[in-house]
Image (cartoon, rainbow, N blue to C red):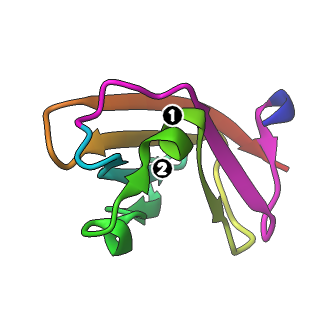
Amino acid sequence: IPGNKIKFDENTYMIFEGLSGFMEKDGMVFPGLSIKGTDNNGKLVLDFDDLFAENSESGFAVADFNSQLASHFKLTGSEFNNPLHCEIIIWDKKSDARVKASADLVLE
């Protein structure tokens, strides 16, 4: 995200590359991905418990998962108290492996 700046009503993509350490079963991995975002006042503005819930049974091919994992969100509205504190957790549904990332983003 260039300059940590995003805009309302635009897709903001988060891309993770080189993920490994998740349990493999028949060439597949079974991740979950959550995103939580709060503004500077602590107001919850993003709350996605598992963006990969629909893939819980089918999973993702290991090669695809290790290469690149992407997700996106879009903020709507017009009032916001910068910055947006965004926390992303990618976890393995078959083991205790997890990756956590956070960023403070400014809405323009």
Q: Which residues are magenta?
A: 4-23
Is residue 18 shown left or right of residue 31? Answer: right
Q: Residue tagged by mark 1? A: 66
Residue 79 or residue 47, whichever sits in front: 47
Where residue 50 sits, quadrant-wise, is bottom left
Residue 39 image offset from top left, x and y in percent: 54, 49
Residue 11 image offset from top left, x and y in percent: 75, 63
| Few, some or many residues within 10 Å of mark 1 (<14, 14–19, 20+) | some
Residue 51 or residue 7, whichever sits in front: 51
- Looking at marks 1 and 2 on the same chain, the residue that comes earlier in the sequence is marked by 2
Residue 36 or residue 41, whichever sits in front: 36
Q: Is residue 57 visible?
A: yes
| Few, some or many residues within 10 Å of mark 2 (<14, 14–19, 20+) | many
Q: Residue at x 76, y 33 (%)?
A: 4
Residue 84 image offset from top left, x and y in percent: 60, 44
Q: Residue at x 72, y 54 (%)?
A: 12
Q: Residue at x 32, y 53 (%)?
A: 32
Q: Give residue 38's mark.
A: 2
- The residue type indicated by label 1 comes to Asn
Residue 71 or residue 105, whichever sits in front: 71
Q: Regarding mark 1 in the picture, which secondary structure is present there?
A: helix
Q: Is residue 86 visible?
A: no
Is residue 68 shown left or right of residue 5? Answer: left
Q: Regarding mark 2 in the picture, which secondary structure is present there?
A: strand
